[in-house]
Amino acid sequence: MSFRLQDHSFFKPAVVVFSLFTLAQLATGSVLYIEKIGLHPAGALEFYAGSEKMLEVYPDRPDGFRNPATLHGLLKVAVSHSLAYGLFAFLLVHLLRSILPDGYRRKPADWLGVLVYSTAFLDILSGFLVTYGPAYFSYIRTPLFAAFVGSTALCCVWLMVLAFTGGPEPYDWGDDGLQVDVKSHEERVRKAAKNSSTKESRPAPSV
């Protein structure tokens, strides 16, 4: 059953606030990435493989006198990022699929979820590839990070659009899959409650 925005008044602002906080996290993470690594492949190569290897490939770049990343440091970052990426990806994709109606309209959200999880995994893996692999892996480090940030930001924007534009519309009600309009369903519930209260208020017949 689809979980609709109109079911709970608190759900809509909660979705919007969560999306805004996630976008803020993505923005600050992007700024930190640019500050530490930069956008040039040489920055990624120096950050992970060290300045010596970077100068072999890019002799014209300035020397940052940086040592190669250690396995301990890479694993420490990978563990923390795996928890954060997994949590944010799960919550965003779950909320997005829950708000969208059942059926074909969920397919784009499914593909977007695959993109978010795939780019998150490759973003974490790319640090190991640049450190221990050939130098050309440095070319994919920044694009992978950008793909993860972009796909996650798209989830947030999509959620906010649904939150602001979502209104009463037919959706699956119950397990029978019947399409029931929200307003008509609420009207039937009110009538049933009124009829039930009327029957209860009638006096019992005397014997």
Image: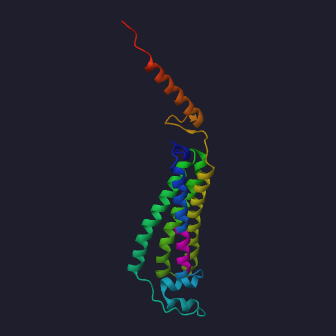
Is residue 31 something one can see in this rendering? yes
**Residue drawn at the location 48% of the way across and 72% of the way down:** 125
Q: As displayed, is residue 195 above or below residue 66?
A: above
Give x and y (percent) for residue 178. 55, 34
Q: Quadrant of residue 20?
A: bottom right
Residue 70, by quadrant, is: bottom left
Residue found at x 54% / y 45%:
4
**How has the structure been colored for display?**
rainbow
Q: Position of residue 167 (x, y in %)?
A: 61, 44
The quarter of the picture where the C terminus appears is top left
Q: Residue at x 51, y 57 (%)?
A: 92
Whole-percent x, y for residue 26 in the image: 54, 69
Q: Nearer the viewer, residue 6 or 116?
A: 6
Picture mark count: 0
Judged from this view, the residue extending furthest toward the right is 165
| Predominant SS along the magenta part | helix
Residue 83 is situated, as x and y percent measured from the top left of the image, at 42, 66
Q: Nearer the viewer, residue 132 or 45?
A: 45
157 falls in the magenta region = no
Q: Which residues are magenta?
A: 25-34
**Looking at this rendering, what residue extends furthest in the top direction?**
207
Tell which of 107 and 197 is nearer to you: 197
Which residue is at a point 55% across and 54% down the rendered structure image?
110
Instruction: Tell me if I can see residue 181 in this picture.
Output: no
Residue 30 lies in magenta, yes or no?
A: yes
